[in-house]
Amino acid sequence: MSESRSEVSAIEGTVVRANSGLYEVQTAAGNFICRLRGNLKKELIRPESDSLRPRVQKARRRRVTDPVAVGDRVILHPEVAVIEEVLPRRNALRRPAPHTGDQHTLLANLDQAVIVFSTIEPRLDLWQLDRFLVAVEAAAVDPLLCINKIDLVPAEKVQEALSVYRRLGYEILFTSAVDGQGVDELRCRLQGKISIFCGPSGVGKSRLLNAIQPGLNLRVGEVSPVSGKGRHTTSQVELLPLENGGWVADTPGLRQLGLWDISPQELPYYFREFEPYLGQCYFADCTHQREPGCAIRAAVAAGAIDERRYRSFCQMQ
Ligand code: GDP
Ligand code: ZN
C-alpha cells in the first residue's frame, strides 16, 4: 500500500474504552477495536504539562505513563485496526499511581463536569459544593452546576444561597429527575460534548442520567464508602454515547472527584474570586490565614470576597 493511499483510508475517531492495550474507537464509520502502531507508545510518553495553568505547571512535572486514554481523538486505519496517531489533548483528568507517583490519565478531552447537588435529601451543602468546584477548576474543566430535586423545594428557595456562585460566573441549571423540569435543557447542554456527572451520593445523578436517556444509568453503580469500589467489576472509564451526539464519561471513581494532589500553594488559584488579589500580599509566601498585609483577607473584610467562601478555602488548606 502506497503512502498516499494509506493516508486516504485513515479516519478520525474517539477512544471510548481502553483495556489491556486494546482501544475501542468510535468513528463515523462505526466502532473499531484497535491496537497502537508499534512505536507510538514510546513517542507519546512525555512529561505532564498540557492541562495545567502556567503558574502551577512547574511544580507538577511528573511522568505520564499512559500514551492513549479514553476521550483521546485518534487517527486510525480501519482495515488493519491500528491507531496511527493521537491528536493533541485539550486537557486530561489525572490521578497519581499509588506507588510510583507517575500520573495516570483517567480521561482526556473532558469538556465539562456537571456537578449535581440536590435542594434537599441530601440538603444543599455549600462547603461540599466548594470542594467539587475546586477539583473541577484544578482539572481545568468547565463546570456546570445542576441543582436537582426542585420538585421537593422550588428553585426560588435556593437562589439566594447560590447567588455567590452566579456572581462568580458559574452557570446553574435547576432540574427534577422526577417531574422532568430542566431535563431537556440539561440534555441540550450535553450535546456533542464529553461530560462527567459528579456530586455527592443520593442527589439524583443516576436518575437524572436515566431521565436524559433511558438506560444511560445502567452501568452506573454506587461507590461503596468502605472499599471505594463500585458494584461493577471494572473501575475503568467508559464513554457512554448520547443519542444526540456526545458522551457521558462514567466510572465509579470519577463521580466523587477528589482533591487529589492539590498543594496549599495552588489551592488559592482555584477560588476564582481570589485571582485579582494573588501576588499582592505583603509576604510572597502568604498562606492567607494569619499573616499581616494579606490582600485576600483585606478583600474579605471589604466585602469583595464572600466570607463563607473564604472560610471554605481555610478548611481545605
Ligand atoms: P445518585 O446517588 O446521585 O446517583 O442518586 P440516585 O439517582 O440514586 O437518587 C437518589 C434518590 O433520590 C432516589 O431515591 C431517587 O429516586 C431520588 N431522586 C432522584 N432525583 C430526584 C428528583 O429530582 N426529585 C425527587 N423527589 N427525588 C429524586
Ligand atoms: Zn495573603
Image: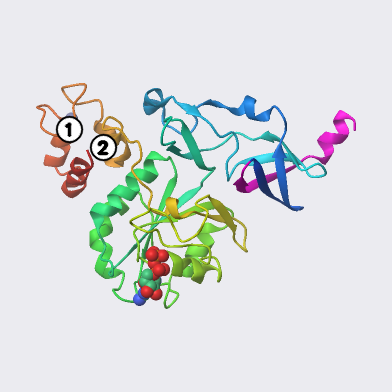
Quadrant assignment, res 255: bottom left
Query: Which stretch is magenta?
Result: 1-20
Residue at image coords 64%, 41%: 73
Q: Which residue is mark 2?
A: 274
In the image, residue 187 lies at what x, y percent?
52, 64
Q: Is mark 1 within 8 Å of ligand 2?
A: yes
Q: Are marks 2 and 1 in contact (CB under 8 Å)?
A: yes
Residue closer to the observer: 65 or 9? 65
Q: Which residue is mark 1?
A: 288
Residue at image coords 44%, 36%: 97
Closer to the camera: disc 2 or disc 1? 1
Position of residue 273 in the picture relative to residue 100 (left or right): left
How many marks the image carries: the answer is 2
In the image, residue 284 lies at what x, y percent?
21, 21
Position of residue 17 in the picture relative to residue 136 (left or right): right
Does the stretch in magenta take in 231?
A: no
What is the quadrant of the N terminus in the image?
Answer: top right
Query: For the residue carrying disc 1, how many other residues have a C-alpha within 10 Å: few (<14), some (14-19), or many (20+)?
Result: many
For the residue labelled by badge 2, is the local secondary structure a helix, a strand or a loop?
Answer: helix
Q: Is residue 205 visible?
A: yes
In the image, residue 64 lies at what x, y percent?
51, 30
The tag earlier along the polypeptide, 2 or 1, is: 2
Does the stretch in magenta take in 19?
A: yes
